[in-house]
Image: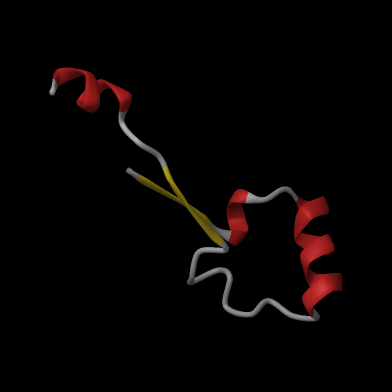
Amino acid sequence: MTVEIYWDDLNEEKQKELLNLFGGNMNWDIFPIACLEIEDVYEEAAE
């Protein structure tokens, strides 16, 4: 399973921190900032 993290998922403090680091939105409202790959342990146990 993949979990995508978008701009609106971040609190205001982290949004400001990213803006200060990168200097702009960089389309984070459209594209995910990060994608987390999570293994489904229940699916593996069934095998």
In the image: residue 46, left or right of residue 39: left
Decide: is 8 above or below 45. Answer: below
Q: Nearer the viewer, residue 24 or 43?
A: 43
Q: Nearer the viewer, residue 29 or 36?
A: 36
In the image: residue 1, left or right of residue 43: right
Q: Quadrant of residue 22?
A: bottom right
The quadrant of the rendering that contains the N terminus is top left
| Name of the residue lying farthest toward the front | 47
The quadrant of the rendering that contains the C terminus is top left
In the image: residue 20, left or right of residue 1: right
Decide: is 5 above or below 26. Answer: above
Q: Quadrant of residue 19?
A: bottom right
Residue at coordinates 57% horizontally, 78% vertically from top-left? 27
Q: How are the residues colored?
A: secondary structure
In the image: residue 41, left or right of residue 37: left
Decide: is 11 above or below 47. Answer: below
In the rendering, at what x and y percent does residue 46 appear?
Answer: 15, 19
Residue at coordinates 21% horizontally, 26% vertically from top-left? 43
Residue at coordinates 78% horizontally, 54% vertically from top-left? 14
Q: Nearer the viewer, residue 44 or 22?
A: 44
In the rendering, at what x and y percent does residue 28 appear?
Answer: 58, 70
In the rendering, at what x and y percent does residue 32 appear?
Answer: 50, 64
| Name of the residue lying farthest toward the left | 47
In the rendering, at what x and y percent does residue 4 appear?
Answer: 46, 53
Number of numbered discs: 0
